[in-house]
Image (cartoon, rainbow, N blue to C red):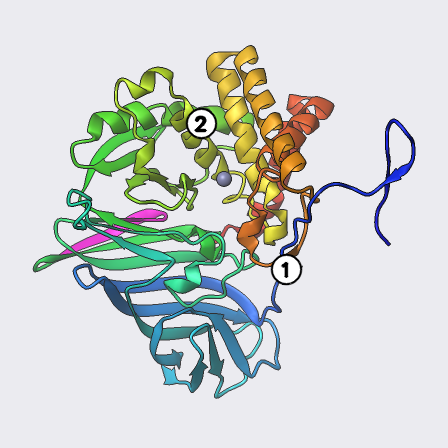
């Protein structure tokens, strides 16, 4: 049966005027059955930047949770799979260009971790990992390589169990031609020069989902700052050092502010922001390593009346708590992180420019949501019915999500609102933090 609403004037039943959110082909989406818990992912890659290709090994340590697993199904799109081993023994596999099905020679024992090693290569990837460089039309474009995993694109650059319900530590070792710098999640544990190449080895010791794994490579200018004793680094194209400082310079103050507001100190060993060319979004909150579009960089004149970049920096930073530390289990809950990151723009505005400015900012968010509701569609904030998860990233989860958080803060009061977050973080973290 259709839903009917009462017309406010006539009190007669009226059909809702809203268009449907669900596109043709939309269906319910569930998290896949887990054959095991992924404990660690190690990517060991060598980039061939002139040929826009790379090759290497993806090692996944998996702790089986069932004793009847005969095969493993990994997400892996448009990769060339050379070989698959488990604990050093070759395994047969099928690969259809989207999923890698590994047939197990031995049924694994629950509790006894096994290590999958997949040797693979990739040429001119279409998603996941992007090679950027000069073209005839844009001869000054810098040479860069960067990744974008959210929501389900990490599978385009490495084989993985690609959904947010799998959290693991991760490690990326990458060989790049000199003088390029490679930045990734966590701490830089080693660098090694080898002829014309340099190997960067990054280690992320706090568990996180595959969509937050990242790699950014370029001949960057590095601006070094800090918050307490944690390095805060801005990477920008050569010659844009002042713009970088101007645009991201408030980051340490923001880290202090959000550590106070959320009642939980910034959790990672560093915070890097890398401004990259042709980025497909405004920013992406990869764990401890946010990527930002280089279009957010402000020159002196633009900085006079443009706070968008500051809001973007605050938004991605707030995700380090909401999204990265506190991870959603399914895309249908994306409002939990996007709503809070968007509301954090309000919180930062309040701290920096006062209550009136914050109220006006919030009003803008509300109007933005209401206009989508009026002209596009109305939907529940949480729904698992869609065609692709990316369809969920609309004003219902960002701007309305922010309004819902404001409502919760108003109802609970700031101190109880904060307490709820701390409890959530502590319960999830104690279970997840593996060193
Ligand atoms: Zn966001």
Spatial CA distance of label 2 from label 1 is 35 Å
Q: Position of residue 132 (x, y in %)?
A: 25, 51
In the rendered image, which residue does mark 2 sit on? 311
The residue range painted magenta reads 183-193
**Disc 1 residue crowd, few under 14, some 14–19, many 20+, Cα 10 Å:** few
Is 243 above or below relative to 382?
above
How many circles with numbers are drawn on the protein? Answer: 2
Is 228 above or below relative to 22?
above
Outermost residue toward the left in this view:
195
Q: Nearer the viewer, residue 95 or 198?
A: 95
- Could you say which quadrant of the image residue 295 lies in? top left
- Give the mark, 2 or 1, whose residue is nearer the N terminus: 1
In the rendered image, which residue does mark 1 sit on? 24
Q: Nearer the viewer, mark 2 or mark 1?
A: 1
Name the residue: 62% across, 69% down. 33
Q: Is residue 28 visible?
A: no
Disc 2 is placed on an element classified as helix
Name the residue: 43% across, 54% down. 149
Magenta residue check for 188: yes
- Magenta region, main secondary structure: strand
Is 388 above or below relative to 112?
above
Q: Quadrant for the N terminus, please.
A: bottom right
């Amino acid at each position: 049966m259709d839903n009917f609403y009462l017309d406010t004037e006539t009190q007669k039943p009226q059909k809702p005027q809203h268009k449907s959110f669900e596109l043709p082909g939309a269906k319910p989406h569930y998290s896949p059955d887990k054959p095991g818990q992924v404990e660690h992912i190690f990517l060991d890659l060598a980039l061939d930047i002139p040929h826009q290709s790379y090759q290497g090994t993806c090692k996944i340590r998996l702790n089986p949770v069932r004793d009847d697993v005969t095969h493993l199904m990994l997400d892996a799109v448009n990769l060339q799979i050379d070989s698959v081993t488990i604990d050093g023994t070759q395994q047969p596999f099928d690969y259809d260009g989207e999923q890698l099905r590994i047939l197990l020679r031995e049924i694994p024992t629950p509790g006894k971790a096994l290590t999958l090693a997949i040797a693979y290569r990739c040429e001119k990837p279409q998603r996941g990992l992007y090679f950027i460089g000069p073209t005839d039309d844009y001869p000054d474009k810098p040479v860069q390589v960067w990744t974008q995993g959210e929501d389900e694109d990490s599978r385009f650059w490495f084989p993985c169990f690609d959904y947010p319900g799998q959290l693991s530590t991760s490690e990326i070792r990458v060989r790049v031609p000199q003088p390029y710098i490679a930045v990734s999640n966590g701490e830089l544990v080693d660098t090694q020069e080898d002829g014309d190449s340099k190997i960067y080895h990054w280690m992320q010791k706090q568990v996180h989902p595959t969509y937050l794994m990242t790699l950014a490579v370029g001949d960057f200018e590095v601006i070094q700052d800090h918050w307490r004793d944690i390095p805060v680094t801005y990477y920008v194209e050569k010659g844009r050092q002042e713009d970088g400082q101007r645009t991201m310079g408030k980051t340490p103050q923001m880290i202090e502010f959000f550590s106070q507001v959320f009642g939980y100190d910034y959790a990672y060993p560093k915070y890097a922001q890398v401004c990259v060319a042709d980025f497909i979004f405004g920013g992406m909150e990869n764990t401890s390593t946010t990527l930002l579009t280089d279009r957010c960089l402000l020159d002196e004149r633009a900085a006079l009346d443009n706070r968008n970049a500051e809001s973007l920096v605050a938004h991605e930073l707030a995700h380090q708590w909401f999204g990265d530390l506190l991870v959603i289990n399914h895309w249908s809950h994306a409002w939990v992180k996007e709503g809070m990151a968007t509301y954090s723009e309000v919180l930062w505005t309040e701290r920096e420019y006062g209550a009136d400015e914050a109220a006006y900012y919030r009003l803008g968010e509300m109007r933005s949501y209401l206009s989508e509701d009026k002209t596009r569609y109305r939907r529940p904030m949480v729904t698992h019915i869609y065609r692709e998860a990316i369809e969920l990233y609309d004003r219902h989860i960002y701007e309305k999500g922010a309004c819902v958080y404001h409502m919760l803060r108003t109802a609970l009061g700031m101190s109880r609102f904060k307490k709820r977050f701390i409890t959530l973080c502590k319960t999830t973290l104690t279970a997840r933090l593996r060193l």
